[in-house]
Image: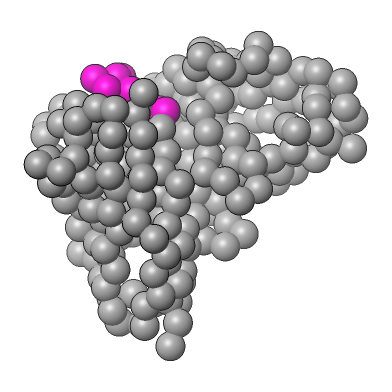
Amino acid sequence: QSVLTQPPSVSAAPGQKVTISCSGSSSNIGNNYVSWYQQLPGTAPKLLIYENNKRPSGIPDRFSGSKSGTSATLGITGLQTGDEADYYCGTWDSSLSAFNWVFGGGTKLTVL
Amino acid sequence: QVQLVQSGAEVKKPGASVKVSCKVSGYTLTELSMHWVRQAPGKGLEWMGGFDPEDGETIYAQKFQGRVTMTEDTSTDTAYMELSSLRSEDTAVYYCATGEPYGSGSNFDYWGQGTLVTVSS
């Protein structure tokens, strides 16, 4: 059971838009930056979004991030078959009297 | 640009220990805060621990405390993660990961390629 809750799967057609939610609490998302990672099959995770809504160099603007209260959202527009991957949110958490990094359970994106 | 290159796959018996290395290039290890993340087959990402630059100590996830040791050799810019008392549930791909040098510590910009550790009798 992950501290951050993500939907197990989402799907949409090529060219469409999809959003992936990440729900947490005041001990994690509510008081810390959120980052998002894309993991293509058989590869290491790749940073997509950092500090809630910033994109690293080389990440297309089809990917966007937002945060409100204790939830964060990853948006992907103009879906491409190459976007099929697992997506994870992550942030620091201080609920166990110590700081721990936590990831969401991951969301599998299918581009139909 | 930071590059992280990990050691090769390992097969261990239950009860044994494994030590995975992560060689840094592009920057020195002292400029980075190295973390370790693992992923069991078909499962999600799980943070194991990492360096906290604010107090200069390594912090471990409670789940692994007493069983994991993360060390660094600054002379070779190589980070190590040793996990002891291995059991079948420790079968996973282990990644080293870090943020930008002197960064906010709020994300993992760079990842190693992963090291598969298989625990089997």
Instruction: Decide: is A102 above or below A13.
Output: below
Q: In the figure, is residue B30 to the left or right of A12?
A: left
Residue B107 vertical placement versus B93 (above, below): above
| Residue A101 visible at all | no
Residue at 65% across, 30% down: A21
Q: Quadrant of residue A60?
A: top right
Q: Quadrant of residue B27?
A: top left
**Is-magenta flag for residue B105?**
yes
Q: Is residue B60 above or below residue A95?
A: below
Q: Nearer the viewer, residue B74 or A22?
A: B74
Work out which quarter of the rendered image holds the C terminus of chain A and state it.
Answer: top right
Picture layout, residue B92 above or below residue A17? below
Q: Residue furthest bottom?
A: B121
Residue pictured at 51% horizontal, 28% vertical: A47
Seen from the viewer's position, the closer of residues B37 and A98 is B37
Seen at 16% across and 50% down, the residue is B71
Q: Position of residue B35 (x, y in %)?
A: 31, 42
Please provide percent x and percent y for residue A29. Answer: 46, 27
Q: Position of residue A74 (x, y in %)?
A: 64, 24
Estimate the x, y position of residue A7 in percent, counting from the top left. 69, 41
Q: Viewer-proximal residue, A109 or A25?
A: A109
- State the residue at coordinates (44%, 51%): B114
Q: How are the colours assigned in the image?
A: one colour
- Taking B84 as reference, is A95 left or right? right
Bounds of the magenta segment: B100-109
Magenta region, mostly helix, strand or loop?
A: loop
- Please say whether residue A48 is visible from this viewpoint: yes
